[in-house]
Amino acid sequence: MSPRPFVAIAAGAALVAALAAPAVADTAPDPITVPAVDGLDDDFMLGVDVSSALSLEESGVVFRGDDGAPADLFEVLADHGVSDVRIRVWNDPFDVAGNGYGGGNVDVDRALEIGQRADAAGLGVVVDFHYSDFWADPGKQHAPKAWAGYTVSETASAVHDFTADALTRFVAAGIDVTMVQVGNETNNGVAGVSGWDDMAEVFQAGSAAVRESAPDALVALHFTNPETAGRYGAAAAALDARGVDYDVFASSYYPYWHGSLENLTTVLSRVADTYDKKVAVVETSWVHTLDDADGHENTITEASEATAFPISAQGQATAFREVVQAVANVGDAGIGVFSWEPAWLPVGTPDELESNKQKWEQYGSGWAASYAAEYDPDDAGRWYGGSAVDNEALFSADGTPLSSLRVFEYVRTGATGPVVVTEIQRVSLTVNEGDKVSLPSHLRVTYSDGTVAEEAVSWDAPGSYPLGAHTVDGTTEAGHTVTATVTVRERSYLPGGGFEGDGAGLWSLAGTGGSIGWQADAVEGENALHVWNDADFAGSASQTVSGLEPGRYAASATSQGAIAEADAVTLTVTATPTHLPPQASDRARAAQTRAADAPLEFDGWRAYATAQTPAVQVKKGADVTVEISWNLTAESWGTIDDVRLIRVG
């Protein structure tokens, strides 16, 4: 994961159904309720990634035990049932002046220090080689500075030597290396290399180094987006066809984005059964609050983004337990689950922002420092700052463990706490201007023991709502205070703009690289237009509307993804006259055709941006076509969603 917060620009179809989203409800006192996972092997890894730990401590963060007294982080983790610590390793996360890029500034030296402290606390160590100088994920797999310009064979050789040298140092230090990741979230590349033939050469080189230097460690390859149909099966088949030697097919799984747990079990089981591989989830997390604790916006900021589990410590425990169950359901091949950066705490409060910024820059305790701009100008160079996941920590802001940290112990033993409310359904509606607003008469109330009740609710609601966002208060029959958010937008005259249901069939696709269907990164609903290809590609998606009232109309769309600076995806609205006689010349038709366009932005994964075209004049009887066209280089990718045609003025 690369923990940059995304800019979410609200969008919606004609009517978005009520979303079941947890309100911040009563927090369950200790002990929380966690049913034991039946049949969990003693060697099942229950781990954490705390790669930012050294930078946090250097910034003055103090970790504490349950009694509130200062304590060593790694001993606290061990005391709460954690078995292994995962450590990311970057090649050279520093500029020429020695300024760290951030995210813990974790090069081999600092990874060794973390590993020694984990080993001293009796914890196993998982080494996560990014083969990059900073964050590697599906959106970016930059080669290290020192490897710039290398051929594939030279890169593979460098990967082998770097891996072997680092692991030799780990083993010499007496660290118990239980597993080694050859790459991080390598969906689209590794070490600056893309394409399965070339990636396989790099993977094989890294694997060989692990076998030589840490022969007792498992070799893991790491991918993400299990929700994408066929992705994991295709990856495992590609690796098998090229004879890549590895033990563990590792996955990220964040419930906000990555589909159902049932699907996770299914796709991992297919890999395990077909290719005789072990499987694990090496990154997962959940929020305990929506509040920000350090003045740097978090990745998850809205209840509508976190609907799978309650937003509470109990919700965190339930989420982790359910991911463990999903991996355990694979059978003996399921070997572990890791919580991602559950100790990435604020270095100061939001009202200390200027001081916080100094610490993030000096110690690398934020997700990125400004110094990283030289290496990653498009992402870190724009969004550098503090912790984007402090609301997903398993510790309170003062360093004291939350009750959810006990989940590592409780998934083995089980625990039953008092029955309290952990989730009350929150309602969010997006409607077009003039549409009737109908708020639900009953809401779901979920309790810590997993039971769910339907409670009647009365709303303090006016009869109509003007354009804009409105908060409506309500009270359930049991006296719980609830809220509904009603967003009223201009009416859209494009019936298939959300790509949902029958609306998907209203679009005409041309060229290559475009597909319409289920996408985890859809702005709303389930479907979106997705663009990607492994070779240079160009194409379009268009929809035509007839019978509009005369007036001025503009088109808008929301996009996210990553494309090259010279590439383009363009949104165009065109009004074509239909009243001219058949014998009218092309020149006459062109003279009365009106068109306007706007470029769509692709600033990174889930960095949503909305673009709108200038308005065009639509005369009586004219046809209006909204088109999304692209001309992109290989491996560019993105989604376009919530395409709208609105009347202006």
Image: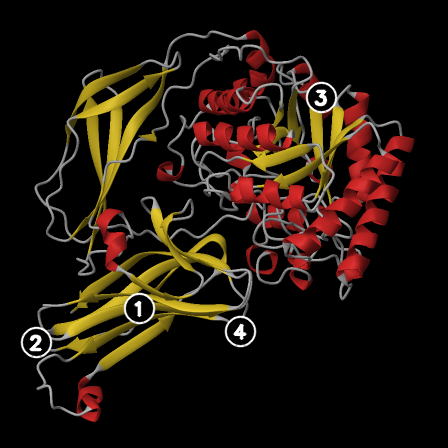
- Circle 2 SS class: loop
Q: Position of residue 560 (x, y in %)?
A: 44, 56
- Residue 286 higher or lower than 1, as above or below: above
Q: Quadrant of residue 223?
A: top right
- Circle 3 SS class: loop
Q: Nearer the viewer, residue 94 or 545?
A: 545
What residue would you read off at disc 3? 71
Q: Position of residue 599 (x, y in %)?
A: 40, 70
Q: Nearer the viewer, residue 434 or 522?
A: 522
| Residue 72 seen anywhere in this rendered image of the structure | no
- Circle 4 SS class: loop
- Give the left or right position of residue 273, taking residue 70 as reference: left
Q: Amino acid at mark 3?
A: Ala
Q: How many marks?
A: 4
Find the distance from the CA under tag 4 to the CA under tag 2: 38 Å
**Mark on residue 627?**
1
- Give the left or right position of residue 329, taking residue 28 as reference: right
Q: Quadrant of the N terminus?
A: top right
What residue would you read off at disc 2? 620
Within 10 Å of disc 2 (Cα), the crowding (few <14, some 14-19, many 20+) is some
Q: Earlier in the sequence, mark 1 or mark 2?
A: 2
Q: Position of residue 592 (x, y in %)?
A: 17, 86
- Circle 1 SS class: strand
Q: Amino acid at mark 2?
A: Lys
